[in-house]
Image (cartoon, rainbow, N blue to C red):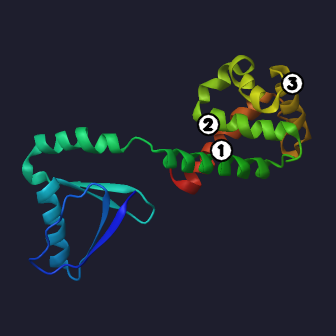
Amino acid sequence: MRHYRSVGTIEKESFTPKKLKSEYGFYIACDDRAILNCVNSLLLSSGMIGLSDTEGKMHYLIDGRRGKNYVLGQVKERVLPLREASPSDSLYEDAVIYRAIDTVIRRYGFSETLMGTRILRVLLFRLYKEPKLLKCASKSLYPLAQPEFHITASQVERNLRYAIRRCAKLKENTRVLTVLGLLLDATMNEVVNKYGRG
């Protein structure tokens, strides 16, 4: 469990950060000098500080006054392990992908009542994570929908084909693999355009 503490207003020479691993630190600075003193004290005590922006992205400031070898060591030992995705990061990423898939499916006019559309949603998510699955769809991609929908790989393909045929915007494009590739590209573009990362 994490505890919160507030240091309060930082006076010019009175700030001394404490090393407490299980806390968040709140430091309130009233002027530029107090901000610089706070940052300098944190850098002197730990060599690195992490700052979060309004989107929740972390930015790390490493004390370069200690030399380039120190900086490289800090990046390797402390920053790179922090970059590994936490469960909450992966859940957020999954939600972003599903939201983009739903937008693309609606844009193309797929009927949401069809099982093929629900299968399409699941398969597009898997393809987004592993695009190489599209190369051998019948052996590697279609079986991924079997446990959730309790149908065979050939039934997966048949349901997809039916959903594609019912889609007015894809009348001329009835090859399942072509449509999957098209929708995957549209999903990737949607994620990049809306959320700024692929």
Q: Secondary structure at mark 3?
A: helix
Q: Is residue 182 visible?
A: no
Is 116 on the left or on the right of 128, as rendered? Answer: right
Q: In terms of sequence position, does the residue under pointer 1 or pointer 3 come before the other?
A: 3
Expressed as whole percent of the image width and height from the top left, the position of residue 71 reads: 16, 45
What amino acid type should be assigned to the residue bearing mark 3? Gln
Count of numbered labels shown in the rendering:
3
Number of the label disc, if any, that sits on residue 18: none
Instruction: Determine the image quadrant of residue 85.
Output: top left
Q: Residues within 10 Å of mark 3 (few under 14, many from 20)?
A: some
- Most foreground residue, 6 or 195: 6
The three-letter code of the residue at mark 2 reads: Tyr
User: Residue 187 bears which disc, if any?
Assistant: 1
Instruction: Tell me which numbered mark, 3 or 2, is placed earlier along the sequence.
Output: 2
Mark 2 sits on what residue?
A: 128
Could you give the CA–CA distance between mark 3 and mark 2, rounded to whole angstroms?
Answer: 22 Å
Query: At which x and y percent is residue 48?
Result: 20, 54
Nearer to us: label 1 or label 3: 3
Q: Is residue 189 above or below residue 7?
A: above
Q: Is residue 89 left or right of residue 111?
A: left
Q: Earlier in the sequence, mark 2 or mark 1?
A: 2
Q: Position of residue 49 (x, y in %)?
A: 24, 57
- Badge 1, how many Cα within 10 Å: few under 14, some, many 20+? many
Answer with the quarter of the image where residue 114 lies.
top right
Regarding residue 45, the answer to whether it shows in the image is yes
Horizontal side of 151 relative to 190 (left or right) equals right
Residue 193 vertical placement versus 15 (above, below)? above
Query: Mark 2 or mark 1: which is in front?
Result: 2
Which of the image's four quarters has the N terminus?
A: bottom left
Q: Which residue is mark 3?
A: 155
* Nearest the eye: 52 or 158: 52
Assign a secondary structure to mark 1. Answer: helix
